[in-house]
Image (spheres, grey):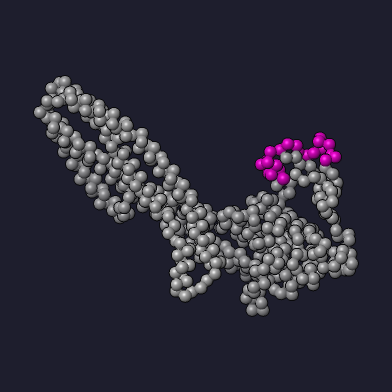
Amino acid sequence: MSILTSNVDVPNATEVEADQWAHIGLGIAPAKRLLDGLFGFSVISPYDYRAIMGYVLREQDDYGDVFHLKKFRGKHQDWKPFLAHLLGLNADLTVELYMEIARADELENSIVHHRREGGTAGDSEVVKIEGIIGIRQRDLSELQKTLDTFNFSRADAEANQELVERVEEEISKRNEEIYRLSQLLQRLDESLREDAILFSPEQTEELFSEAGVAFGGQIKKDFEQLVAFNRAISDERREYLIADRTEVESRLNQIRPELEDLQRERAALFDFLEGSDTLSKYKEVSAQAVTLRTDISSLERQRDALNEIERLKQMQRQIQERKNQLQTAIEQDVRIQAENSSGRYREIQRYFDDIVHAVLDEHALLSVSVSSTGSLEFSAEIVDSTGSATSASRGFTFKKLLCIAFDLAVLRSYQGQNFPRFSFHDGVFESLEPRAKRRLIEVLREYSELGLQPVITTLDSDLPDVVGSSENTVATDEVVRRLHDDGDAGRLFKMRSF
């Protein structure tokens, strides 16, 4: 990226020599930081210039929602804190709330993971499991004493020592791991089966039809969209489970051959000990000891998983308490700003209503509320004399006007501060009736006279009157660029498309 700064108009930057450019060949990230510094929109700090650009550069796709722009189709924390800051609210509270929500989601995912390790045992069964572990350990200790009392000849003793210390230990480890992985594989399969979507739009439609309730294809479509949505939000979880299952199966396939080799080796050692009077009893006691060790290890993992779940739940309660505190603080902040007649929020409200009323002769209300979870909810509606929302603002034409009114109201509120002083709106006159178009032209002129720079695009056919034909339409000197398809001269930058 290269950046050219100038105090005079530059009709064609391609004619400027390279050594006169301020910065040449910057990477994307450094160029963004430098441009942010050059703009110096300090009033929106700590957010950079790109946060506000969506509200002063509106494309057609950005008229669907006054506040939620196309480029912010992600999570609410990507745009709501900035919008709160823009309206004069305490954005830090909203940022912290979303951080706590993210922490709560991470804890919940961790609890689900440990829940699989804990099996079907309840969180309150830790003490019981601890007691069972103690019983198993005492039983193992008694068996170990029995094994220690066996009296072999020197050769038998050496073979037995190798059997116990190496082969049996390795076999025990493999058996224990196979047991654990098999249990985990079973739980993963159960989790994958639970993800199945059992809802059938066709059966539901048939059921309603038989009951005498008629509904059209749209309802069925809505149900199908619901199923698609549910399936989409579970994709990530299924991918995680499938990846875990693949890893578990791979490890099982690796362990089983190793276990077979160890068992053959153990058989060879037993052949060496064949004829010993104590061999039969030794094998029996050793098998019991292996089973007990495996059982103890499994119980210990279950206990540790349940203990970890309890710790995570304590953290969840702390987070919930903090979320409640933040929700209360956000509610108080919204109420204070709503009651402050000289504050930023009320000022933008007034300018917003003034613009809509000037164009439509109807009032509009911009409002902020707090949901049950503490999240900010933003609303912009055309209202009647009682303050109740009308259906007018639901149409695309009026929604577009609300977007224009909001953007201009924000510009006017921040006038004179380190903030953008221009706005760009594409196709502003489409679908408006002629009288509303003429009134909107007057509003744009009024804001231009305030020192702001509203920039609009329109087709000739969408103008209320021919350019320059009267005072109520666009004047000839207000047209700064005419675009057409007859050659490169009709393109915005007078160059071929790329």
At 51% from the left edge and 57% from the top edge, which residue is drawn?
A: 228
Which residues lie in the magenta part? 14-35
Say left or right for 231 vs 66.
left
Which quadrant is the N terminus positioned in? Answer: top right
User: Of 146 and 39, which appears nearest the observer?
Assistant: 146
Residue 223 percent across, percent down from the top left: 51, 63
Tell me: 78 left or right of 168.
Answer: right
Q: Position of residue 442 (x, y in %)?
A: 81, 68
Residue 347: image location, x then y, percent: 69, 66
Q: Is residue 494 magenta?
A: no
Residue 331: tell me if it is visible.
no
Residue 450's x, y, as percent? 80, 62
Whether residue 432 is visible: yes
| Vertical relation: 2 (above or below) 57 | above
Q: Nearer the viewer, residue 338 or 388?
A: 388
Q: Residue furthest top?
A: 155
Report whether 299 appears left or right of 404.
left
Q: Is residue 107 left or right of residue 8?
A: left
Quarter of the image with the C terminus in it: top right
Q: Residue furthest bottom?
A: 386
- Is residue 29 in the magenta section? yes
* Picture residue at 62% right of the left edge, 54% below the top: 72
Q: Hey, which quadrant is residue 484 in on the image?
A: bottom right
